[in-house]
Image: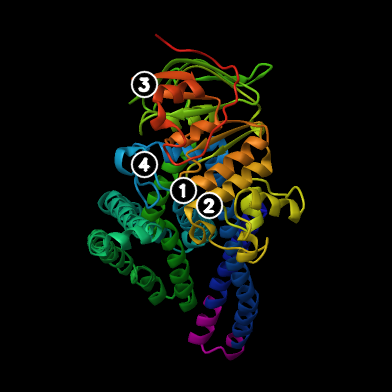
Amino acid sequence: MAWRLAIASTALSIATTLLLLKLSYTQSNLSSNLSEKSESGFYSAVWEFVGVAAVATPLFALSEWVDGLLVIHWRRWLTGHMLDAYYADRAYYRIMLCSLQGLDNPDQVQAKEGGGVVGGLMLRMCEDARSFASSSVALMVGLSRKLFYLAAFSGLLFSIAPRMMWFLLAYAAAGTAVTAAVFGRGLMRRTYEVLRREADLRFQLVRVREAAESVAFYSGEAREAGVSHARLAAAVHAALRRVAWEAGLALWVNAYSNTTLLVPSLLMAPAYFAGQVRFGDITQVSFTFQRIESALSFVVDNLAALSGLAAQTERLDELLRALVPRGDPGASVARGAARAGAVLELEGLSLWTPGGAQHLADGLDLSLGAGQSLLVMGPSGCGKSSLLRCIAGLWDEGSGTVRTLPRDSLFFLPQKPFMCLGSLRDQVTFPHVHTRGSATDLAALLAAAQLPDLLERSGGWKAEADWAQTLSIGEQQRVAFARLLYHRPGLAFLDEATSGLDAATEDAIYTALAATGASFVSVGHRPQLVQWHTHVLEAQGRGRWELRDAEEYLASRGRAASPQASGGGSMTLRRHTVSARLAT
């Protein structure tokens, strides 16, 4: 479709150029007959002018419409291409994980403390792509029309006034060179700086909106207002610098254009006074001169737009390069299918954080059989969640092998569940698009997740809301658990997935999970969690881990680690065989 629109735009540009060429002859006849007081010739030229205008008017309007459609289709393709790259190979997660050295922070690429987490990139994909599509189409269509003007009118001008044609070529070349040398790079840098500063301001305001409750609890509005005003001042300062450059460019462009206003009349006057040309020829030459001058002065007249397009192109190019998967020259974790009787196998797993800053595991070997469960424990920052990221394929920096069930038999519950845009039904079935099971079946899942009243309270399965804001973190975790029950995985991973629940609700959740017969791996701190697992993997520091039977683990901790001491009831441990060979 876009190519057809481009061809149509080109054809319309040619047609309108030919109409303008015809109009130059019509104006010449009109002026000559008027100066010669030829009444019949004058009215004949008037009717000719009306006919040309009647054809040209709808064609020019049609040309604008086609150009608008071309912008829309070009933007749709460009944004779609970036969205495909954003979701391919989990680029969205890779960008979030890495600080993207060299990629500036237009709103969406802002490294948080530690450089490990990066905000979204959606503004570049949406707003920058829209601006780029509009600017690029406008400039390309404008350039093509100027070239058609040059091709159509240069022969006419050269046949009437060859000296004028040579003057125009030299004048335009000199003007373009001066404009590019004096204003080109400087204006582009100022435009890029404005885009960056405005994006910084937007990003800070979005952060305040997303953390509004936390800011309010801290009474941090004064501090955040100060940051906003500081970023606003920086954006205004950058805009003032760009305006100063644009004013200088406008002064130069006006001087450049006004200098040539009298050139056609001055060069044609001697021939007219000598009776060698008609008065209409002067009108035609002036019209032709203006069209050729506008074609040859394209860079001079559009430098501001070209500078803006260059800045937009640089930003989008940075984003597209960031989205392309980068080959890792270093070692990476190998992956494969778990062997018969096993659901998870780690063989010689050594794991580092992205960039190699922290060693998380050193030669870990582990085999988890069907129906078994494992609790991963240790102090904050020791790498518990990182093990799950490695198993999920999100982190690969390290060595060794991870063998699991097929991806569609795995399910991960993070501590902060993702609440998608959509209905309550969508929250339970995510990421499935088409629902499996009846409404009664789904309601039973909510009941098992200790949310029996959520359906009625929310207004039914089709009710839509900002679920991340409407539901508490505990309710979100229970919805995520209903999601797990819906998908019925062979192996589930729970990364502190019950941290927002009270002990009784947590017990009910794990009771329902154990009843499914699925194997599961949990990450958590609470000793109460041990009773729901057959084995415990505990971090020992420096990348070392110790694996023990759950009963043995509790015995080593004494009564203080028992459910009774932590407020729970009696526990029943199920014995399974798990082999582990840890590096010495």
Return the disc, 4 or 3, that comes first in the chain's sequence.
4
Answer few, some or many: residues within 10 Å of disc 2's Cα (few below 14, many 20 plus, some between 14 and 19): many
Q: Nearer the viewer, residue 132 or 106?
A: 106
Q: Nearer the viewer, residue 21 or 330?
A: 330
On the image, numbered disc 4 is attached to which residue? Answer: 103
On the image, numbered disc 1 is attached to which residue? Answer: 500
Tell me where residue 194 sits by quadrant: bottom left
Q: Which residues are magenta?
A: 28-42
Magenta span dominant secondary structure: helix
Label 1 vs label 3: CA separation?
Answer: 26 Å
Counting from the top left corner in percent of width and height, residue 293 is at: 41, 62
Q: Identify the element where label 2 is drawn.
A: helix
Q: Residue at x 34, y 25 (%)?
A: 358
Return the disc, 1 or 3, that comes first in the chain's sequence.
1
Answer few, some or many: residues within 10 Å of disc 3's Cα (few below 14, many 20 plus, some between 14 and 19): few
On the image, numbered disc 2 is attached to which residue? Answer: 476
Q: Amino acid at mark 1?
A: Gly
